[in-house]
Image (cartoon, rainbow, N blue to C red):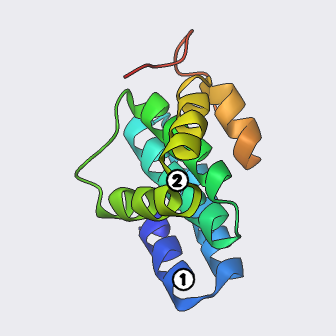
């Protein structure tokens, strides 16, 4: 719910509230160490990066989201939308390279990227 609210606030242009909502969603997802929820919330953080004018960083976070989940979640409409916008903004080659950097991260490194202390979910990064 907090992550969805973050997407809504971003669409409304209230970036401060979007950040607060996504940050709350990350906090909620960490306590049960729920990888799919953490992955979904990372999509929200990618949207924030995209809207902040950092589409290449958004691609890194999207790759990290797939790494946490173990694969990209094609059922997540927000993920498809943010991915498409980031890819359009930087082009296929730069997007793919940034996404691969995200895939190669551990959850601890992902947390450091977005400023959150995430638990280590696996000993190695996920690949797709």
Residue 30 vertical position relative to residue 82 in the rendered view, above or below? above
From the viewer's side, name the closer residue of 41 and 119: 41
Q: Residue at x 53, y 38 (%)?
A: 99
Is residue 68 left or right of 59 when viewed as pictured?
left
Where is residue 32 drawn, in percent x and y? 48, 37
Q: Nearer the viewer, mark 1 or mark 2?
A: 2
Q: Circle 1 sits on which residue?
A: 9
Q: Badge 1 local density, few (<14 within 10 Å), some, or many (20+)?
A: some
Where is residue 107 drawn, in percent x and y? 61, 28
Q: Residue at x 70, y 60 (%)?
A: 54
Query: What secondary structure is found at the residue carrying circle 2?
Result: loop
Tell me, for residue 84, which label it has, or none.
Answer: none
Instruction: Residue at the far bottom: name it.
Output: 12
Q: Residue at x 29, y 63 (%)?
A: 77
> Closer to the N terminus: mark 1 or mark 2?
1
Residue 48 vertical position relative to residue 16 in the rendered view, above or below? above
**The N terminus, quarter of image:** bottom left
Image quadrant where residue 4 sits: bottom left
Q: Badge 2 local density, few (<14 within 10 Å), some, or many (20+)?
A: few
Instruction: Residue at the far left: name it.
Output: 75
Where is residue 47 drawn, in percent x and y? 55, 64
Q: Is residue 4 among the parts visible in the rendering?
A: yes
Separation (CA) of disc 1 from disc 2: 27 Å
Query: What secondary structure is found at the residue carrying circle 1?
Result: helix
Q: Residue at x 54, y 83 (%)?
A: 9
Q: Circle 2 sits on which residue?
A: 91
Q: Is residue 24 among the parts visible in the rendering?
A: no
From the viewer's side, name the closer residue of 60 and 126: 60
Where is residue 61 drawn, in percent x and y? 58, 45
Image quadrant where residue 83 sits: bottom left
Is residue 50 left or right of 91 when viewed as pictured?
right
From the viewer's side, name the closer residue of 83 and 5: 83
């Amino acid at each position: 719910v907090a992550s969805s609210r973050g997407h809504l606030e971003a669409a409304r242009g209230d970036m401060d509230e979007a950040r607060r909502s996504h940050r709350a969603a990350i906090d909620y997802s960490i306590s049960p160490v729920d990888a799919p929820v953490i992955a979904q919330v990372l999509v929200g953080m990618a949207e924030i990066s995209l809207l902040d004018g950092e589409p290449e960083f958004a691609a890194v976070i999207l790759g990290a989201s797939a790494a946490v989940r173990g694969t990209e979640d094609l059922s997540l409409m927000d993920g498809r939308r943010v991915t498409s916008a980031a890819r359009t903004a930087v082009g296929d080659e730069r997007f793919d390279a940034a996404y691969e950097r995200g895939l190669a991260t551990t959850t601890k490194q992902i947390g450091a990227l977005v400023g959150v202390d995430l638990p280590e979910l696996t000993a190695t990064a996920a690949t797709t």
